[in-house]
Image (tube, helix red, strand yellow):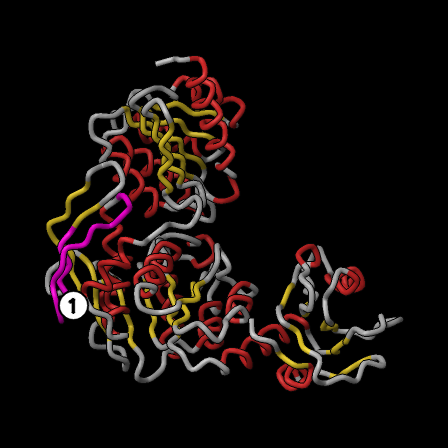
Amino acid sequence: MEALTLRQLLEAVNGTLLGDFDDLDAAAVQVSTDSRSITPGCLFIPLEGERFDGHSFISSALEAGAAGCLTARERESYLPGKFYVKVRSTQRALWELARYYKKLFPIPFIAITGSVGKTTTKDMTAAVLGAKFCVHKTEGNFNNDIGVPLTLLKLEKRHQVCVVEMGMDHAGEIDNLAALVEPDMALITNIGDAHIENLGSRDNIFKAKCEIFPHLKQNGLAILNGDDPLLATLRGKLPQPTVFVGGGEGLDYAACDLNSDGAGHLSCRVKTPRSQFEANIPALGRHMIYPTLMAAAAAEALGMAPDEIIRGIGAFLPTKMRMNIIRCKGDIVILNDAYNANPQSMRAAAAVLGDAQGRRKVAVVGDMKELGPGSEQFHRAVGGYFALAGADRLIAVGGLARFMAEGAQEAGLSQADYFPTLDAAKNALSREVRAGVTILVKASRSMAFEKIVDFLLANASEEERCGTP
C-alpha cells in the first residue's frame, strides 16, 4: 500500500477526527483488520460480526504500532500520538476507503468469478501477465466482502495490472464486489453446483455470476468459457466485446492436441484470433485448458506476444492445496487438492487421478458442502466418477462421504470404503502409502483434509526411514 495521509483518509471515509490529534499529514502505510497482525504505521479497521467486535482490540492494536484506527463509536479515552476516525460503519468505511484508493491507480483491473477454478484462473492469469507486467493479484482466498477491498488496498505504484478473484454464495454478492472493482475485463470460468443450497438452481447461479456485467466497463472485455452451456447463451447478448474459450468448435480461443504426461505437465496447441502456439502447462488435468486460454485472451488484449504468453504459462504455480503435486521419496505421489470441493471440481480431480498411468491410483475424498436437497445424489455421482476414471481404491471420510463410497461400489469399484472420521481411516490410509502409488486428497474446506495430507506425508517419511519398499 502507498501511504495515505490522515487528510486523505478523512475524505475517503467521510469521517470525523476524535481526540486531540490534529496532524492531518500523518500517514498510514498499510491497512489491517486483524489486531494479531499489526505492522508499524498501519491503519487498524475493527470489524464487527455476529460473534466478535473488533472495537475491543483497538487499544491493543494501537499499542502494537498501528498509527491510528477507524471506530464506529467514541472512546472513553484516547492514546496520545494516535489518530481515531469516527465513521458510521467500519465495514462500510473499509469499502469506501478501497474505492477511493483504487481510483489512484489508472491500470487495468481484471475480475474473475465462476463456480469452479477461480483461484487457478487467477493464478494462471497473473503468471501469464507477469511475463510482461508487474501484477498484483488476490492472495489466497481473499475473494469476499472483506478480502476484495483489502486486496485493492495492497496496490502499489509499481503495479501495472490488478487481478481480482470474486467469490459468492448468495445472490447480490458479485453485484457488490463488481461495483467496487469496476473491471476492465470480466472472466467467468463456468457455472456449476457450488452453493446451490443457497441459490436453488444452476440458472440462479448463472444469474448471480452475470451480476458482474453491468459493472464491466463499456469498452471492457468479457472472457467466457464457451464450453459451458449456460455461458454459451451469452453469445451476442452483451454490450461489451466478448470472447469464448474452450475445446469446442468455433471458439475464439481454443486448445487442441492435448497430451498429458500424467506426472505434472499438460501440453496442447493454443489457437487464438491472432496466433497459434504450443503451450506446456505445468499442471495436471484437461480442465487446465480453461485458465490457460482465459489468461491468453487477457494477455492478447493487453498486447502481449506469443513468446511472452508461453513464458508466462511456464511460470504458473498453483495456490496451496490446489492440486499441488507432492513427490515423496520411495516413488510416492500425493495430489493435495484439499482446499475445496464440489461436483464439478471432483469430476476434474477424478480425471487427473485417472491420468496417472502405470500407478496405483487412490482417491481420499470427503464431504462436499452446500449442495442442498440433492446432496446425496451428488455424492453418489462423485463416487461413480472415480470408478469410471479408473481409481483402484476410494477412501471416503465424513458423514456425507458414505454416499461416495456407495456410488463407487455401484459403478463397479469394489475397493471403496467409508470411514466416519480421519482417526477411523488411519489404518486404511497408512496401508496405501507404498511405492508406485498416487494418492489424491480432496474435500470441502470445512473438512480440513490438509490433516490427511499431513498424515500421509508423515507415513511416507516413516516408510522411508524403515526402508519399506
Residue annotated with mark 1: 252
- Image quarter of the C terminus: top left
279 in relation to 187, above or below = above
Across and down, in percent, residue 165 comes to 43, 63
Q: Quadrant of residue 117?
A: bottom left
199 in relation to 401, above or below = below
Q: Quadrant of residue 312?
A: bottom left
Q: Secondary structure at mark 1?
A: loop
Q: Amino acid at mark 1?
A: Asp
> In the image, what residue occupies the spot 32% across and 64% down?
188
Crowding at dot 1, Cα within 10 Å, few <14 / some 14-19 / many 20+, comes out as: some
Magenta stretch bounds: 268-284
Across and down, in percent, residue 298 comes to 28, 69
> In the image, what residue occupies the spot 33% across and 38% down?
382
Is residue 459 rendered to the left or right of residue 238?
right
Of residues 288 and 244, which is closer to you in this image? 288
Whether the magenta-drawn stretch holds residue 327 is answered as: no
Of residues 112 and 213, which is closer to you in this image? 112
